[in-house]
Amino acid sequence: MLPNIPPKLFSLSAVVVGYILIDDMTANEQNAVGNWLMLVAQVLSTNAFYRAVMQERGLEPVGSTETGRNNADTFSGMYGQSSGNIKNDDSFDDNDQTIAMLEKMVRAMQIEIENIKRNL
């Protein structure tokens, strides 16, 4: 499950990870990893979009994309089993999660800065 963090911070974390990954790879390795990540993204995007289509057609419960369940669980819930909304019981509030994520990003950037300094 993804933490509840602001969209801009979520995007920034992808930028940081991308910059960290490029230093230790050749151009061909970067291309291979980048294409693999894009394929993963396409699978996720395609699945999410198709589930939205199924919801629009009334063939999938509306709350199913919010629960993190896979398609088998979702569709089995349509045929007699309850598909009630699942609440998030995490003990962390949004601010604590955001702070923790920022601290991890800062540590990762500090490590990367130290690596760059050592290689100069």
Image (cartoon, rainbow, N blue to C red):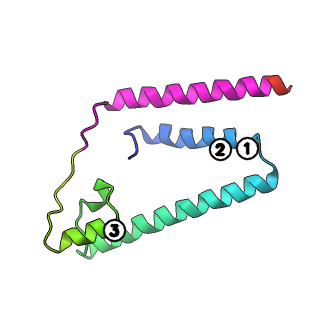
Position of residue 105 measured from the top left corner of the image (x, y, whole percent)? 56, 30
Secondary structure beneath dot 3 equals helix
Q: Which residue is mark 3?
A: 71
Secondary structure beneath dot 1 equals helix
Position of residue 45 measured from the top left corner of the image (x, y, whole percent)? 47, 63
Q: Between residues 85 and 12, which one lies in front from this camera angle?
A: 85
Mostly what secondary structure, the magenta segment? helix
Asked if marks 2 and 1 touch (Cβ < 8 Å), the reply is: yes
Asked if marks 3 and 2 touch (Cβ < 8 Å), the reply is: no
Inter-mark Cα distance, 2 to 1:
6 Å
Q: Residue at x 43, y 67 (%)?
A: 47
**Residue 4 sits above or below residue 104 on the image:** below
Secondary structure beneath dot 2 equals helix
Q: Which residue is mark 2?
A: 18
Q: Which residue is mark 1?
A: 22
Q: Amino acid at mark 2?
A: Gly
Q: Which residues are magenta?
A: 88-117
**Residue 64 sits above or below residue 25 on the image:** below
Instruction: Verify whether residue 98 appears in magenta.
Output: yes
Q: Residue at x 15, y 67 (%)?
A: 81
Q: Earlier in the sequence, mark 3 or mark 2?
A: 2
* Residue 24: quadrant of the picture: top right
Q: Is residue 116 left or right of residue 39?
A: right
Instruction: Verify whether residue 39 appears in magenta.
Output: no
Q: Amino acid at mark 1?
A: Ile
Q: Earlier in the sequence, mark 3 or mark 1?
A: 1
Q: Amino acid at mark 3?
A: Asn
Position of residue 60 measured from the top left corner of the image (x, y, whole percent)? 25, 71
Inter-mark Cα distance, 3 to 2:
30 Å
